[in-house]
Amino acid sequence: MRNLLFSFLTVLLCFAMSTPSLSQDHSASLSYLALGDSYTIGEGVDFGDRYPMQLVREWNKTATIPFTAPLIIAKTGWTVDELETGILATPTAAEGYDLVTLLIGVNNQYRGRSVESFEGDFEKMLQRAIAFARGKKEHVLVVSIPDWGVTPFAGQKGVDPDQVAKEINAYNRAKKAICKNYGVIFIDITDDYRMEGALPEGVVEDKLHPSKIIYGQWMGKLIIELKKMNF
């Protein structure tokens, strides 16, 4: 009887050691992949002021399960195909992520490429983003392209802001339609940016890229959608 009791206690102990506790579950962390160009890398702002960094910081203030530092694959000037090359050159990007954000396309427009050529590249990139999110399309957030035509930089270059706005609108319509087809959330930051992107506090030193204040506004829209996700 004593041997039987000892065996039973041993089994219970082994089970307890092999079963994660609630505290262990809560100590888990979430992963985040941010894909994009200069707007994602945060050209002209401090590392911590990039919108992916602001998003993680804001989430972690109250979250039970925090995000680790995001993996950011982005570079100033990248088009969609160049982002693809950057992904292929980043071996760690092969992992699955709990959240994927995608903001790309402004450099396709800036270089005068057609919306039609952009659509095909963007759809492939969106498919890649969904795959990175382990197939969970609801964990992918796509951000619209800001209208750089309103910035002081554009004014200094003699750019026609109406033409830029027209082209940016066409690009964003294409992005939104593709996102809708895939059931992916599309977040519009363009309308608000047109009202604030030209303000002195809305740009960094180059008079083109957004300040941390603007990135904070984008983060505010992202966090709303993030809080709806089931983690």
Image (tube, rainbow, N blue to C red):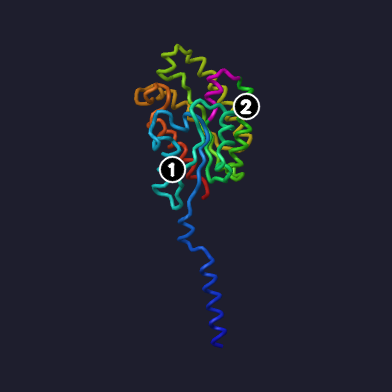
Q: Which residue is mark 1?
A: 56
Q: Amino acid at mark 1?
A: Val
Q: Amino acid at mark 2?
A: Glu
**Compared to 60, does 161 lie above or below?**
above
What percent of the width, then of the height, locates residue 196?
Answer: 40, 25
Answer left or right for 26 relative to 121.
left
Q: Which residue is mark 2?
A: 119
Label 1, residues with CA under 10 Å away: few <14, some 14-19, many ≥20: many
On residue 19, which mark appears?
none
Question: 55 or 94, which lies in front?
Answer: 94
Label 2, residues with CA under 10 Å away: few <14, some 14-19, many ≥20: some
Residue at the location (61% across, 25% down)?
A: 118
**Compared to 49, does 105 lie above or below?**
above
| Residues rendered magenta in the picture | 104-113
**Quadrant in which residue 59 is drawn:** top left
- Is residue 118 on the magenta stretch? no
How far apart in space, not on screen, are marks 2 and 1 (Cα)?
Answer: 30 Å
**Quadrant in which residue 142 is drawn:** top right
**Compared to 82, does 91 lie above or below?**
below
Residue at the location (41% across, 47% down)?
A: 60
What percent of the width, then of the height, locates residue 3?
Answer: 56, 85
Residue at the location (40% across, 49% down)?
A: 62
Question: 222 or 205, which lies in front?
Answer: 205
